[in-house]
């Protein structure tokens, strides 16, 4: 089973993303801040990370850079309503971005595509817990 880390300070967004991903058999771990996300990454290595561009304790671009240093091959997807989304995604070298609001089918399709093109086995990641 694939694992995802969803980082967003809004419970509703985390809940909807978790629901959408669980429907395509992806196990989701949630984090509401950058600090919580970094702590979660000490305990698990996800196959994909979906995160908000703006977090209460740190910018998403800063967090993405730090994650990228530790886990350079894990795809990171920014989710935001910000007009700066495309530029921020490029600066942080993320795999993709989703503009809020997005359709759940769009999210599921993007995640499926990234998980099949960014091979987790190449990173030594197992697909089962």
Image (spheres, rainbow, N blue to C red):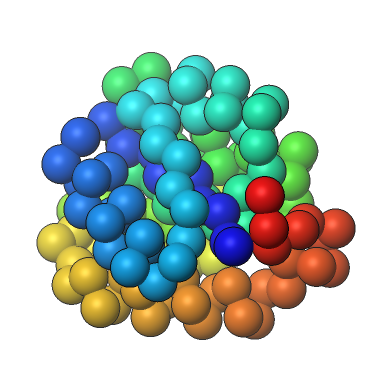
Indicate the position of residue 47 as horizontal and vertical percent values: 62, 57
Residue 43, image quadrant: top right
Q: Please name the residue shown 64% across and 81% down the image.
A: 117
Q: Does residue 103 appear left or right of residue 88 in this picture?
A: left
Classify 8 as above or below 85: above
- Please indicate whether residue 19 sits to the left or right of residue 59 in the image: left
Q: Residue at x 15, y 41 (%)?
A: 12
Tell me, yes or no, if residue 91 can be seen here. no
Q: Position of residue 31 (x, y in %)?
A: 41, 31
Q: Is residue 40 above or below residue 115?
A: above
Give the camera-side residue of 125 and 48: 125
| Number of marks drawn | 0
Q: Is residue 25 visible?
A: yes
Pinpoint residue 67: horizontal percent, then vertical percent. Answer: 64, 39
Q: Is residue 28 left or right of 8 when viewed as pictured? A: right
Identify the residue at image location x=59%, y=62%.
1
Residue 52 is situated, as x and y percent measured from the top left of the image, at: 34, 44
Q: Is residue 128 left or right of residue 101?
A: right
Residue at the far front in the pictured view: 129
Quadrant housing residue 106: bottom left
């Amino acid at each position: 089973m694939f694992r995802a880390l969803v980082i967003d300070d809004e419970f509703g967004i985390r809940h909807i993303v978790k629901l959408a991903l669980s429907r395509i058999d992806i196990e989701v771990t949630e984090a509401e801040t950058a600090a919580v996300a970094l702590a979660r990454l000490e305990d698990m290595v996800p196959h994909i990370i979906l995160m908000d561009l703006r977090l209460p304790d740190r910018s998403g671009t800063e967090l993405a850079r730090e994650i990228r240093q530790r886990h350079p091959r894990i795809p990171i997807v920014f989710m935001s309503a910000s007009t700066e989304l495309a530029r921020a995604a490029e600066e942080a070298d993320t795999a993709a971005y989703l503009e809020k609001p997005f359709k759940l089918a769009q999210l599921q399709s993007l995640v499926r595509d990234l998980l099949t093109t960014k091979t987790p086995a190449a990173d030594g990641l197992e697909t089962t817990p």
